[in-house]
Image (spheres, helix red, strand yellow):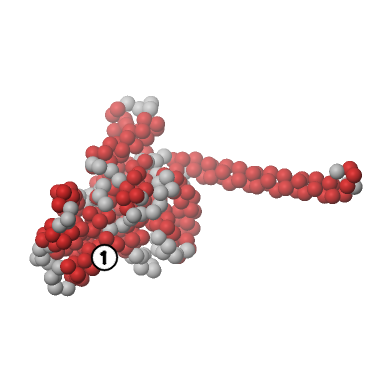
Amino acid sequence: MYPQSSQKKFWSFKTEQELQERRLLQNYNFIARHGAAMSGEQKAAFFLSADEERLLLKQYELQLKEFCKRFEPPMPKYVVGTAFHYFKRFYLNNSAMDYHPKEILATCVYLSCKVEEFNVSINQFVANIKGDRSKAMDIILSNELLLMQELNYYLTIHNPFRPVEGFLIDIKTRCHMNNPDRLRPGIEDFIDKTFLTNAILMYAPSQIALAAVLHAASKEQENLDSYVTESLFGAAEDKLPVLIEAVKRIRSMVRTIELPQKDKVRQLEKKLEKCRNQENNPDSQIYKQRMKKMYEDEDEAELMATSYHMNASDVSLELMRLPITEL
C-alpha cells in the first residue's frame, strides 16, 4: 500500500536539508512580498526568520499533541498521527506569518477526524476549544478547503500503528520473547515523539514502527538483533544496511528533539502578531471586509441564479401555451 501511495510519491523527502530548503523558501517568499520597501535590518527586526518560524511551529506541534490528548471523546492514535502529517505538510508550502499556526492546527485536527472517520460534529469538536467557540468554528470551516488545497487533496495517511501490530504478532510467532505486549508503552511513547521530528516526512511507516519496537525492546533489556537479521531479512540481506541506517537515523532524531524555551516562544508570538498577513487574520478589519465582500458576492450570485431560473420558467410556460403548429 505505502510504496504506491501519494504519501510516498509526493510527500516523502530524502534529506532534512531538502525540507529545510522548502521552509526557507516559504519564509523568503513571504518577506519578499510583504517587506519589499524595507531595508535588511528592518526586515530582520520585523519579520520572523526561518529559524524563528521553526521554533514557533515546534511549540504548536506540542500544543497539537496536548489538544488531542485531552480531547473528549478520547481520540484514536491514528487520528493524531494524521493531524501531524497535515500540519507539517501545510508549512512546507506556507509561512507561519501567512497563516497563523493556532488556526491551522485546529483545522488539521478537525480534517483528520473526518478523513479517519472519527465521527465528531463541529459542535462537539469546538467544545474542546477554550475561548470563543463560535469564532473557532468559523475559522475552522473557512480554513478547511484551504487546507485540502494546500495538501493537493492527498488526504490518505499511512501511520506506523498498523505495522507495529504486525511486528508484535510476528515477534509472538517467531521470537521467544516473554510477553511482547509489555513493549507497547515504550513503542507508543517513541512514536509520539517521532511526530515532533521530520521522520514522518522522510521514512516509511514500517521503518518508524521497527525503530519504535527496537527502542522499546532495548528499554526492556531485550535484544531483537537476531530477529531482524534472520527472521525479517534472512532472505533479503541486501536491504538490511539501508534499514539499519534508517532505524539509527530515526532514533537519533527522537533522541535529539529540542523543546523551545517558553520565554523565547512568548517573544516570537508577539512578533508574529505584528508581522502576520492581516488579510488572513480574523481579528483584522481587512479580513472582515474581505469576508463581507465574499458573502455579498455569494448572495448576489445566488440571486442571479434564482432570477435566471424564474425567467427560464416563464419562457417554458409561454411555450406551453403556444399551439403545436407554432412550435
Residue at 18% across / 50% down in the picture?
Answer: 239
Q: Quick one: 301 or 250, which is closer to the camera? A: 250
Residue at 15% across / 68% down in the picture?
Answer: 175
Query: In x, y percent, where is residue 188?
Result: 24, 63
Query: In x, y percent, where is residue 90?
Result: 37, 46
Query: In x, y percent, where is residue 30?
Result: 37, 35
Marks counted in the figure total 1
Q: Quick one: 100 or 228, which is closer to the camera? A: 228
Note whether residue 199 is visible. Answer: yes
Residue at 27% across / 55% down in the picture?
Answer: 205
Q: Using residue 259 as the reference point, say whether residue 30 is left or right of it.
A: right
Quarter of the image with the N terminus in it: bottom left
Residue linked to disc 1: 165
Q: Quick one: 30 or 317, which is closer to the camera? A: 317
Quarter of the image with the C terminus in it: top right
In the image, what residue type sits under mark 1? Glu
